Structures are given as structure tokens and as C-alpha cells.
Amino acid sequence: MEVIVVESEAEMARIAADAVEHLVESTEFPVLGLATGSSPLPVYTDLIERHRSRGLSFAGTTMFLLDEYAGLARDHPQSFATFIRDRFSGHVDVRPESVHGPDGDAADLAAACVRYESQIVDAGGIDLQLLGIGSEGHIGFNELASSLSSRTRLKTLTDRTRSDNARFFDVAEGVPRHALTQGIGTILEARHIVLLASGSSKSIAIERAVEGPVTAMVPASALQLHPHVTVIVDDLAASRLRHADYYRAAYRDKPPWQRI
Ligand code: GLP
């Protein structure tokens, strides 16, 4: 894992947006994995700005969401499909039909999960997956005790996840109890994974994910098994990392031509 400790939100956004820009400029049919939540928002803002100011184009890009609440239709105001359209995809030139998410409103949710896995495979797999991390160490909606080889499926949300996400809903009881999420096995098939975390509320999850043992009790720790993961954290999220000085030195000494 490469761990990059940044000094500002803008720096975090720039490094991740550079990786996305390189992907979309150098690949004929780029496939981008998107996360919702607050962590990736500065990256989306930066990419929208690059699109507006110098024409960075997503016209040929296919996008896949990590997860979706069960029971919410695509156009529900709190669905992740709406979130990503309002915060990112609706502001760039990606074709709306090229932005995919699990169908949380399907009559047969298990079949919708299988279909989603096939859509990802048919697109050639995900080139770059952006990830946030839950305060208990989940990725997507893979809550603790998720199988490290899980595929897209229905998961029950923990009380902590529901309360963390209540800020996006009018009333806390409105947060659905279930969600469809790419599995950990699905996420690990992305060719490059960029995990973003900021603030002290993420410091324990980051410490466990990066420096703790690989365990289903901390789903993000499974990323240690992937050959190309970049973890970008601010000082607060990095505050419990025992080897932060080493990560800083390694990034400082990296040749400028070597990308994340
Ligand atoms: C939700 C999402 C995750 C996200 C996490 C953290 O649970 N399903 O994909 O990483 O929240 O969100 P935030 O970035 O807002 O802290």
C-alpha cells in the first residue's frame, strides 16, 4: 500500500483527480468506480473544474457506483444514484446511460446483484476505484464480518453506519436498514484503488486498515491484499499511524515521473 499524508483537502483532491485524469486521457474506454459520502466530494469538485476550465472529457468513460440503498428508486432524492448525478456525473460530459449503480429498487434484489457483477465484467472491469472508509472500517457497505471474497449482495447496515449517514436524511429513521454493495472480492478486482479519508473520526479505521491484521472485522484491511492501493489521508486521519514518518519520506523521495 502507498500511504500519502496530505496537508490539505485541496492536495488530497488534486492527487486523486490527477490519477483520474491520467486514466481518462490515456485509456480508450476508461472505467471509473465511484464512491458516495463526503470524502470524495473535493475530488469530484476538482474534476468538474478540470472539465469546465480545460475540457477534461468523460465522454468515453463508464462509471460504476459502489453501493445503493435497498428500497430506494434511482430517482429518490437520497439514493446514491441521485447523489452522484448531483455532485459529479451530472456536471461533466459522461453519457447518463454510462453511469451504473446497483438497482436498489429491483423486485428481485439477488438477481439485480448478479446483473451488476455482469455489467462490470462486460465493461472490462474497473480501472480505478475511489473509496471512502466508514468509521468502523467498512468499504462500500461491507460491514464488519463481511467475507473478504464477497460479491455484490444485500447487506444489513450497522446502527453506527445508519447514524453516520443520517445527516443526508431529513429524519434519522429514514436511513434504510439494508443496502446493495459491491463485495470485497468485487472491489479487490479493480486495477487501482484510491482510498480517501480525512478527519479524526477516521483515524482508528485507518490505523486498523493500514497497520492492523487483515480481518473481516475491519473490511478495509482486505485492501492489504491488493497490489495497487493508494491511501490518501490528512494529518488527522493519519494521527494514529505508527509509521507515518516513513510514509511521508517514501512519498517525498518518489521520482516525479512515478504516478500513484
Ligand atoms: C457510506 C458509504 C461508503 C463511504 C462511507 C464513508 O457508508 N457506503 O462508501 O465510504 O459512508 O462516508 P464519508 O466519506 O461521508 O465519511
Image: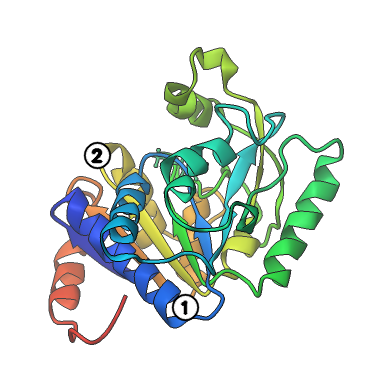
* Quarter of the figure that contains the N terminus: bottom left
In this view, 183 is above or below 28 = above
In this view, 171 is above or below 37 = above
* Quarter of the figure that contains the C terminus: bottom left
Q: Position of residue 162 (x, y in %)?
A: 52, 26
| Residue ID for mark 1 | 227
The numbered mark, 2 or 1, whose residue comes first in the sequence reads 2
Disc 1 is placed on an element classified as loop
Q: Position of residue 99 (x, y in %)?
A: 60, 54
The amino acid type found where label 2 is placed reads Ser
Report the disc number at residue 71. none
Q: Determine whether, in the image, residue 1 is placed left or right of residue 70.
A: left
Q: Quarter for ligand 1?
A: top left
Disc 2 is placed on an element classified as helix
Q: Position of residue 120 (x, y in %)?
A: 68, 65
Q: Position of residue 152 (x, y in %)?
A: 70, 53
| Residue ID for mark 2 | 200
Question: Which residue is nearer to you in this view: 103 or 53?
Answer: 53
In this view, 149 is above or below 140 = below
